Image: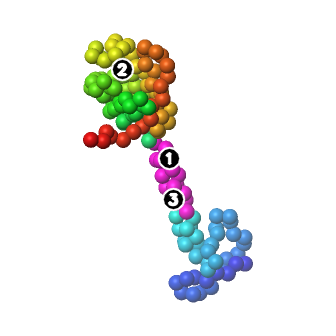
Amino acid sequence: MHEAHDRRGGAAIKSSGPRAKDDAVSPDGDRAYTRFMMRSAAVAIALTLVGLAGTARADAIDGQWCHLDGKRIEINGPRIRTPGGARIDGAYDRHAFSYVIPAAEPGAGGTVAMRLINDDVMHLRPPASGELQVWNRCGPPIS
């Protein structure tokens, strides 16, 4: 037989038989309190997991990109500002971008292909040399 005290009136509550696993109570015998604490813990864990998943989301090719030679590219959805300053449309994917070099820039008519490696690194393959270039995310230009 188990005995617990009711928090509201202080009277002893008696029950017979073993308690089920999910029939746990707090030290002072309040089952509702124990259920509340278990649910609160589950909600806290779920919110933490959702928060951690949200931190991994910043993986898009959009933004400002810089090369060691001083060139800059800006990608905003299907729009790009090329290293030569032209604002044109290209083929956009969340993790990749390609465009045909405009007539006024070196390599005109060739296709440039870019692929996002991680949040801060992008690989660019120009048509002329075909040599892979490593570009890094950068801030806006300083005036």
N-terminal label among 2 and 1: 1
Seen at 42% across and 15% down, the residue is 127
Q: On the image, numbered disc 2 is attached to which residue?
A: 99
SS label for mark 1: helix
The residue nearer to you, when weighing 50 against 130, is 130
Quadrant of the image containing the C terminus: top left
Residue 101, given in percent of the width and then of the height, sits at 33, 17
Q: How is the image coloured?
A: rainbow
Quadrant of the image containing the N terminus: bottom right
19 displayed left or right of 75 = right
The residue nearer to you, when weighing 2 against 64, is 64
- From the image, state whether disc 2 or disc 1 is nearer to you: 2
Point out the stretch of residues depicted in magenta. Answer: 41-57
Q: On the image, numbered disc 3 is attached to which residue?
A: 43
Seen at 49% across and 44% down, the residue is 56
Corner quadrant of residue 136: top left
